[in-house]
Image: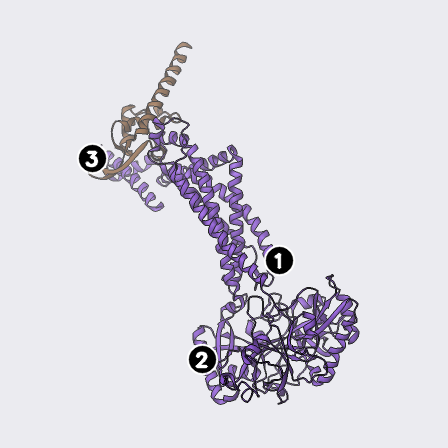
Amino acid sequence: MRNAKNEEIDRELAFHLDEAVRAKIAQGIPAAEARRQALVEFGGREQVKQTVREVHLSRLLESLRANLLSAFRFIRRSPSFAATIILTLALGIGANSAVFSAIDAIVLRPLPFPHGDELVRIHQRNRKGKAIEDLVSTQRVEDWNRLNRSFQVISGYSIGDVTYTSGALPEKLTLALVEPGFLRLWGLAPALGRDFSAGEEKFGGPNAVIVSHRFWQSQLHADPSVIGKAIHLSGLACTVVGVLPENLRYPERDIDVWEPNAPDAPYAQNRDAAWFYVLGRLRTGVTISQAQADLDAVQNALGKQYPQSDGSLTVTVQPLKSALIGAAKKSLWLFYGAVSLLLIIACTNIAALLMARTAEREHEISIRTTLGASRAAIVGQLLTEVFVLALAGSLLGLFIAAGASRLLGLLSQDLPRIEEVTLNWQIVAYSLGCALAATLACGLLPALRGTRRDLSQSLAHAGRTQVSGRNPWQWILVGVQVSLAVALLIASGLLLRSFQALGRVDPGFSRDHVLTLRISGGWGETVDLGKLTQRVDRDLNGLRSVPGVEAAASTVTIPGNSELYPIELKLPDRASGPLADTSSVSSEKIFADSRVVSAGYLSTLHIPLLQGEDCRSGLPYNTFLVNRSFAGKYFPGTSAVGHHLQSIPSVDGKPGAIVGVIGDVREEGLETPPQPAIYWCAARPILTRTFLCERTATRRPWRKPSVAKSARSSRRGRSSAS
Amino acid sequence: MSPAAKTDLLQGTLDMLILKIVALGPVHGYGISQRIQQISNDVLQVQQGSLYPALHRLEKRGWLAAEWGESENGRQAKFYKLSPMGKKQLATEEATWNRLSEAVALVMQTAR
């Protein structure tokens, strides 16, 4: 475009010069001399060209300046109208930019690691039965690492509680037990110190930990000399060898300390001893499907080698990002759709306003047209007016977006990667893009309508006050606006309705007046189960003695906490039992969710006992409660009480008796129907995390100090968290 | 052609002269400069550095329309002609000019 113009100027000037030379030759001047004279008379040719070019440039700037001036005049003349448009757009663009900033950070941007797209999550599934066996044994992780050809490294982690006893008070920490190569997997070096050494990753090697940046700041006073010093974790002295960089919030954001797991430890040799979630880093250039095929082959070979443990297992490779953001992605896009619809409604609204406005200005426009302004010039002027408003709106919108994304961060802390949501230049550019799009969406139709060809004629015979209320376009805009608003209302109404429906779902237990707390333990304690049971009993008795506490109980998982412990069961007396005719389920393996609860669990959470009796202390460990779903499914038409269950692998080889049937509890969340579940009657935990629940007589503020004091008095060196 | 006779054109006068010349019929830039020089008996010589920017400015304002065509000796040249708006503009400028020059002449004569 520009070049064509330049060339045209060139040609025009060359023609002039040639004509001058010809004229001189015609006067009898020799050709060379004629040309010299002509050039001298012409003056600096480049200079002439430049001045001509400036004419074009300054005309462009002039019209832009004129349009801007007219836009400011427009704002000054009707400030309330302008303010309405600016505010509407600010809200629309602000909400849109805020949600987009979340989508950008969470869904669109790669994970904040070198080559973050190479990181994958490796899931393990059991082909038989529907249980997801996502926990993988050390030996299998080692085998995968050794046999695959498509991964740089495969590693795993396991999360547990540990008690930090080097501080003033015992503190519960979140510990990640990690397989060798875990830090290498992220492609990160520690911010301070070093990675675990090979010796520390061997059984019997020195106890070493790497601490998180947050823990280093809060508990170790950000002291760089802490490297090489020992801290005490659950009674063990561990040397701090490194501090992680601040931005490592994966795989879970609140991990405090990292400890190596020794693959050669005797307890890690069993292929069924599974406690690792597995992550991997692909070799450069390897695709997910190639890695999947490779790992499929590896696991197939392992299945043949170890049919007992590996025969029915399959693996799935999933990009880590999609594994992390999971369902959040869908809700974010839904949210984005809603705010975009809102912006469109705002735009149609503004378009209708502008259209009415342009109708009022018909007179002005027709005069300009008669005076020779081209339609494009007038449309340009009208659009510039809208653009100035939209620009102001989007700048105001950025402030709204900044506030909104902070609010979003506060309200949805469960959202993965929420810490990475920031307002950056991309978002500024995005909102400017919104302003531009809004200008076209709001302004183009009114501008085109307002400058129709027949307008100048309308000036001739219509009175100067003709403002038409019969504009069909205005009705169309109102229609669009109303239908979009109705769509948005219906969608939000449906969401509200689902929410309301959830509120009406009977969770199966009563939440009121129930307080929960968590007490840490150590694997070391599981050596003496009797002592462990005594300890939990002592804690519970301490709680029960706190004034106002009506009932207290322990459990390994509380309702709403989504940690599930699915187990495999046999019903040994099922085949010979009174219902042998419905033998479809007879002695075959069945799966159920499992819980370990102490006496008093039912009365603490107000779960109804339907048949039989509650857990009480003194019953053998192999005593079960089952829920109504379990009883209905496996003992239809008869009482489940008195029948026996055997877990696989069994605890002590003997089946245990069902002593009671209780109501269904929606433990995995209100939207999930209750599954068949069994409850082990035992005070002692099977894991290092134990929840204590207490029911108080009145609704009152959480009195953690008194409860924590009671728990502390029962044992030193143990932390509790509400 | 005495160089001393060369007179600087009044600001804005060149535009009027161009419009006037172009009003006689489609003409290219070289032709315009030649004609101004001839008609003014060589008193007015238009510099290329003023002529072409003025032509483009007038074209941009919509007073002149331009078109490439064949010159008298068969070469491609850019021809300018007056637009309806240009015609109106010329009339306005001529009126203003006449009023101005009459007024100036009156003052000069009376004050003699």
* Image x and y of residue A67, in percent: 44, 37
Which of label 1 and label 3 is nearer to you? 1
Q: Is the residue marked by circle 3 packed among few (<14), some (14-19), or many (20+) residues within 10 Å?
A: few
Q: Which mark is residue A576?
A: none
Secondary structure at badge 1 equals helix
Which kind of residue does numbered mark 1 sit on?
Answer: Leu
Tell me: residue A105, above or below residue A225: above
Residue found at x 46% / y 34%: A70
User: Which residue position holds label 2?
Assistant: A294
| Chain B, colour shown | brown
C-alpha gap between disc 1 and disc 3: 80 Å
Q: Which mark is residue A410?
A: 1
| Chain A, colour shown | purple
How many numbered marks have been drawn onto this rendered protein structure?
3
Q: Are marks 2 and 3 in one subunit?
A: no
**Residue A56 in view, yes or no:** no
Dot 2 and dot 1 residues touching (CB under 8 Å) = no
Which kind of residue does numbered mark 2 sit on?
Answer: Asp
Which of label 2 and label 1 is nearer to you? 1
Q: Quadrant of residue A691?
A: bottom right
**Residue A511 in view, yes or no:** yes
Q: Which mark is residue B72?
A: 3
Q: Is the residue marked by circle 1 packed among few (<14), some (14-19), or many (20+) residues within 10 Å?
A: few
Tell me: residue B107, above or below residue A544: above
C-alpha gap between disc 2 and disc 1: 42 Å
Between disc 2 and disc 1, whose residue precedes? Answer: 2
Which kind of residue does numbered mark 3 sit on?
Answer: Glu
In the picture, measured across the screen, residue A560 lies left or right of residue A377, that is: right
* Image x and y of residue A185, in percent: 55, 74
